[in-house]
Image (spheres, rainbow, N blue to C red):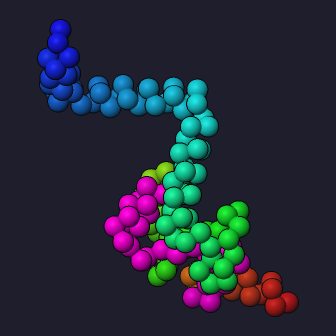
Amino acid sequence: MHPSVQRDADKRYADRHPDKIRAKNRRFMTKYRKEHPEARTESIWRKKKRIFDLLGGKCYSCGESDWRCLQIDHVNGGGNQQKKRLHSANEKYYNFILKELQFGSKNYQLLCANCNWKKFYENNEISTKHMATILKVMSG
């Protein structure tokens, strides 16, 4: 069978049986992830590196450039809510941020862990319950 004829037949089958195609793809990806766990980790880190590069590769506040302590910060807060909406803290999350940055978004910056926690604390981005506990423990 000519490849273009086969391709058309495959497309018609996929259009008629989307659930079977999804199940087949899910089985393939489950097997692939078990056989190649490093592939997903590498993919995530490549995306994270690309994001770091797009954000200048150093802490916006203090200039720290050690990638081990750099974190992606949402300029106006809301990072935890975004992760929950995307149901993921990894690949979907980094894909979303990467696309936003490629379209010119200014909603993200790199902060080192210290500066990010200071911002988190100073902007009251922590629940009142947790803030009270932290203040009680740290000031006593």
The x, y position of residue 34, in whole percent, is 58, 29
10 over 95 or under it: above or below: above
For the point 63% across and 76% down, which residue is it? 59
61 over 9 or under it: above or below: below
Left or right side of 122 for 11: left
For the point 42% across and 77% down, which residue is it? 106
Can residue 87 be seen here? no
**Within the image, what quadrant is residue 111 found in?**
bottom right
Query: Residue 121 lies in magenta, yes or no?
Result: yes
For the point 36% across and 71% down, which residue is it? 104
For the point 59% across and 80% down, which residue is it? 60
8 and 50: which one is in front?
50
53 and 93: which one is in front?
53
The x, y position of residue 75, in whole percent, is 49, 80
Q: Magenta region: which residues?
A: 94-123
**Within the image, what quadrant is residue 129 found in?**
bottom right
